[in-house]
Structure formats: C-alpha cells, structure tokens
Image (cartoon, rainbow, N blue to C red):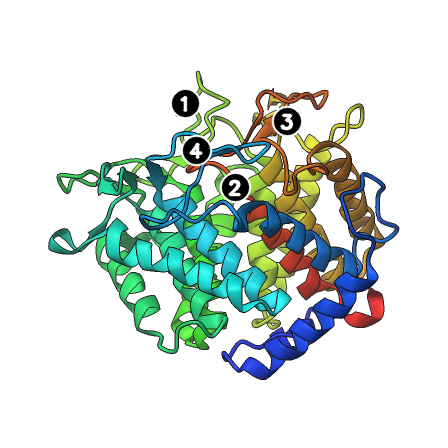
Amino acid sequence: PALSWSWAQAGLSSSGDSRPRQRARDCVKLTLLAMPQGATTEPPAAFFSREFLLRHIADIVAFYESRVKDEKGGFHQSFMADGTRFNEGFKQIVSSTRMVINFMLAGHVLGRQDLLELGAYGLRYVKERHYVADKAAYAFTMQDHEPADMTQQAYGYAFILAAHAAARRAGVTQSDDDIRQVFDLMEERFWLKEDGAYADTISANGEMSDYRGQNSNMHACEAMIAAYEATQDQRYLQRAEVLADTFTRRLAAKADGLVCEHYTKAWEPDWEYNKDDPKNIYRPWGIQPGHQIEWSKNLLNIYRYRQDCAWMKQRACELFDAAWKASWDDAHGGLIYGFDQDRKWTDDDKYFWVQGESIASAALLYHATGDQKYKQHYEDLWKYSWENFVDHEHGAWCGFKLSRDNKKYSEEKAVAGAKCDYHTLVSCVEALRAFPAAER
C-alpha cells in the first residue's frame, strides 16, 4: 500500500486547532480507563494497537513529569532507576530540547494541557538560558544555570529546531519565527552548499573542525521533516531531501551502500576515526545499524510527501534489511550496536535507542510496503524490549545499554546528553502514525 498519513489520522492536528486535541483527550481518557491499571510484565497481545501505544506513551512521561521540573529553570536531566536525581547542576542542550519534544508530543497525542505547559517551561529555558544573546549562540552545556561549553554543534542545533517545530505543531506557539531563526543560524554557521550537508562542530573561539559526520546530518534531516510538518514550508522538506540524497545515496555508494559514520573534510569515508574507541556513544567506530535504521525512518517520513521519489522507499528497505541481517542477535534477542565493513560485530551491547528507532522504522516499513516481515520485526523488537528494557516497576525504559546477554551495566535511567526516553516515546508516536485504525 502507498504510505499516507496525516495528523488527523492519529486523532491530532498539525495546525494548533484545539478541537482535535479535545477529541484526542476524550478518546485517551476512555482508552486508559478501559485498560488494566498498574505495572505489568505480561506482553500485550498486540503491540501495534492504539491502546497499547497510548498507554506506553503515558507510562513513559509518568516517570518524568512529577520529578523533572527544576524550579530554577529547565529540567533535571539525570535520574537513577527509582527517580533519584544525580548530577543535578548539569544540563546539556540535547536533553533540554529532547525533553521539550517529549512533552510536546505526549501532550499533543494524549490531549493533556499540563504536559504542553511543561514542554513550554523547558522551551523557555532553551530560549532564555541556553541562548547567549551577546554571542548569538546556544550553550551546549550548562552548569548551575550558567553557560559552560560554548562549542557549537550542528547536532545540538538540529534538536533546537526540532523542539520549536514540536511546539508549533502542538499549537503551543503560534508563529514560525523561532523555527526560521534557528534554521537561519544553521544555514549561516554549518551549511556547506557545495557538499549538500552540514559541517559538524565550531569551537568556542569560532574555528570550524575538519571533522565531518553523518549523525548531526541525520538529526538535521529529522528536524527538517518536523519543521515542514509544523509549518508546511517547502524549503524544510527540500532540505531534508537533499540531506537524504547526500547520505543514503551519494556517500553511501562509497561504503557498500551503507551510511558511514565519519568522513574527512573532503567527504571521504574515514575508517580510522575512533578505531580504538568502538564504544564511543557519540562517535563510535564502524558502521552503526541503528543509524542505518534511523535513515530508513527519515526516508519514509519524506516519502509520504514525495511519493514520486520511489528510490526513497527502496533505500529505506535496503538500509533496514542490511542492518537487521548484520546485527539481530538470534541467541539473546535485540540489535547490537556496531559492526565493521565485513559485518563483523565491533560492539555487541544492546542500546535502548537502537531498539526504539528500529520499532519506529519497522512500523513505517510495514505500512509502506505491506510486507509481513516488517510487522514480524516490529513485534520481535517489542517483545525483546518489553522483556529487557521496559521498567515495569518505575516506568519508562531502563538504562542506556545492556550487555549482549541483556544484563544491566548501571541503575542510571536518564543521563544528561545521553538518555531521556526521547527515542522510545517517539517510536510510539511513529507507530501511531504508521498503523491506520483498521489495522489496530
């Protein structure tokens, strides 16, 4: 079947109209009242049902909403499994913005004004405290509410853009100005027109790094799609298309059809970068199956608006299939973190975000192609995650990663700059988008 979707299909609106949110609120109240209350480890019969997805979104935000607000501004970002805070004075821009997105999306989907207000509270901190007016720049990290690291990273700007898009789409903001301003900053500081990609990092003293990477561009692509959905401004969708073409076609042709993590200044794959650090959480060596799968998601989210671009659906399938074949662990379940050019595993740990993003992509692929294997992958991922990652006692998902045989490394649940359940919550929203009512 053709991939088609609108916010109305999910009971939502992209225009800020409060009536669909009220209908969604009424629907969710009835849905949640009808569902068994309290934590359960029993797998739901249908992980693709609307009821399950709404409930899981509610369970994720339930962990955060009562403890995340920092009365001095912004959000607390680091929590143990039971909700105890640690490293309280430290904030990082990616967690600051991802938490905004979480509350905006959850408030929109669940029809809860209190979550939208919590998201707005976090967005004010991004605009008023992370942003340093005399430098016209955002602090990458904050310590005790003062700017700490002023390194400018396209990765961070991508999520600033996405946070403003989420607020606009939820009807919390009524203007496109914030989206446009962040886009313009990215254009001025990072955009490399001749390369069809964004540069990665600018030091605090204004020097651009020669490092080039796919990760910041992948999230920039994701943010551009969100900006388009919030504003209907074609330039954001066009930029997403350019980024997708650059990384999943032109540059992937240099890496056996896969998306390489690291590049030289001339955009040649750099297979030596961090070769001695394959477990680096931001710039790992090797090929990341999770990133092939995130690009698959991006491609399908563009394709719904560009169905004349059949190559996008084809590449989405190819990237997902290659990643799945190389990284699904038949012995212990789940997708591993990294492999080399010969498909030999370089990091066999199981990272929460890889499973979450793969859930979203499998749902979108099933809806786009009708191929039952993607529905099976979706269910296998959920069964694995339900058993190993979902915290049935405290809510949300447990730590950042597990060992290959699914043992916890730590009781840390949320860590500034690393995890705030953004990927897991968004995967549920994407699944709501993918499965029409008749299939739930």
Mark 2 or 3, nearer chain start: 2
Residue at 55% across, 62% down: 105
Label placed on residue 259: 2
Where is residue 142 shown, x and y percent of the image?
28, 40
| Residue 277 as seen in the image, left or right of residue 141 | right
**Quadrant location of residue 270?**
top left
Label placed on residue 282: 4
Mark 4: amino acid = Tyr
Crowd rating for badge 3 (residues with CA inside 10 Å; few <14, some 14–19, many 20+): some
Label placed on residue 343: 3
| Alpha-carbon span between mark 3 and mark 4 | 20 Å
The quadrant of the image that shows the N terminus is: bottom right
Determine the secondary structure under disc 4.
loop
User: On the image, numbered disc 1 is attached to which residue?
Assistant: 274
Give the foreground label among 2 and 4: 4
Mark 1: amino acid = Asn
Up-down relation of residue 63 to residue 86 (above or below): below
